[in-house]
């Protein structure tokens, strides 16, 4: 099925961001996205794997999908309304922290009037969630920075490194931040992630078609930012579903 790309034009079988080759699988988080069919906010610092996680999940979504980012604080509402009007559809907003307050209120109204629209939002700030939750009566789930952090079980399931002691050391050094975990694994086991399909997300053969490109924009003191973003854990705002 065709889906709508970032510009609002129809683009083949995919839209949105490329998936890094050989990425470490996140099945628990992909399942979390599949399980929630209303509004979900993925909140964490740069490098926490928000965009990659959503891109992997989007690979297995059959409904028409619009992937967009705010431009000068504004959303492409003409394209969003087309997706919302055509039955079940998916809206992904990346870098949603760039939305201004008025756009967030407008988005909330559109969500209220579009009961078949599933919305997934990636943001670096808690403020996006707070603004949206005050603008819509939809049920909002939140994947926090704490939940985005890699766990010992995930590294163990991926089969990277030689044992739990080494994995725990990696997690202490990286803070569980996705981009830092990837770099540490590559440093300790060079080449293990490149072309290693067993470590990639299994949905739709995405990594075999994906680019090698990976975002490595890591903010200064990212680990501290991750802990700060998770302070006062957001939890789930279970208001009346739209």
Image (cartoon, rainbow, N blue to C red):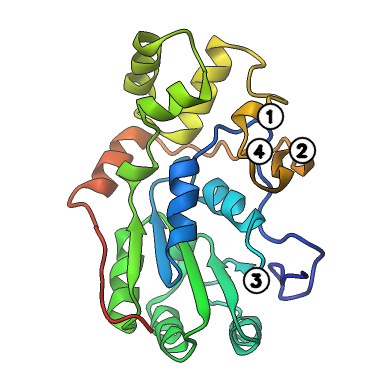
C-alpha gap between disc 1 and disc 4: 11 Å
User: Could you give the CA–CA distance between mark 2 and mark 1, rounded to whole angstroms?
Assistant: 8 Å
Mark closest to the chain's N terminus, 4 or 3? 4
Earlier residue among tags 2 and 4 = 4
Helix, strand or loop for disc 3: loop
- The residue carrying mark 4 is 20
Is disc 2 in contact with disc 1, using a CB cutoff of under 8 Å? yes
Of the residues under marks 2 and 1, which one precedes in the sequence?
1
* Residue 70 visible here: no
Instruction: Identify the residue at horizontal 63%, vertical 23% (top origin).
Output: 193
Q: Which residue is mark 3?
A: 63
Q: Measuring from the top left, give residue 42's x and y in whole percent.
A: 41, 56
Q: CA distance from mark 4 to mark 3?
A: 23 Å
User: Which label sits in the foreground, 4 or 3?
Assistant: 3
Instruction: Look at 34% across and 69% down and name the residue there.
Output: 140
Q: Is residue 137 left or right of residue 11?
A: left
Instruction: Give the CA separation, mark 2 to mark 3.
Output: 22 Å
Report if the CB atoms under discs 2 and 3 are less than 8 Å apart. Answer: no
């Amino acid at each position: 099925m065709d889906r709508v790309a970032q510009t609002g034009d129809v683009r083949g079988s995919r839209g949105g961001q490329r998936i890094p080759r050989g990425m470490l699988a996140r099945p628990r988080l992909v399942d979390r996205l599949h399980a929630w069919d209303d509004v979900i906010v993925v909140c964490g610092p740069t490098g926490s794997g928000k965009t990659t996680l959503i891109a992997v999940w989007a690979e297995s979504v059959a409904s028409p999908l619009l992937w967009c980012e705010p431009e000068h604080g504004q959303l492409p509402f003409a394209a969003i309304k087309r997706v919302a009007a055509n039955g079940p559809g998916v809206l992904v907003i990346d870098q949603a922290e760039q939305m201004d307050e008025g756009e967030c209120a407008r988005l909330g109204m559109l969500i209220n009037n579009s009961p078949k629209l599933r919305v997934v939002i990636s943001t670096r700030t808690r403020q996006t969630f707070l603004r949206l939750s005050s603008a819509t009566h939809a049920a909002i789930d939140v994947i926090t920075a704490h939940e985005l952090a890699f766990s010992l079980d995930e590294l163990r399931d991926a089969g990277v490194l030689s044992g739990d002691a080494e994995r725990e050391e990696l997690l202490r050094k990286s803070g569980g931040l996705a981009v830092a975990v990837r770099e540490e694994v590559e440093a300790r086991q060079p080449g293990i992630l490149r072309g290693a399909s067993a470590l990639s997300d299994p949905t739709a053969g995405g990594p075999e078609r994906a680019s090698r490109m990976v975002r490595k924009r890591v903010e200064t003191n990212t680990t501290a930012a991750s802990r700060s973003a998770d302070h006062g854990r957001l939890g789930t705002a279970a208001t009346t579903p739209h």
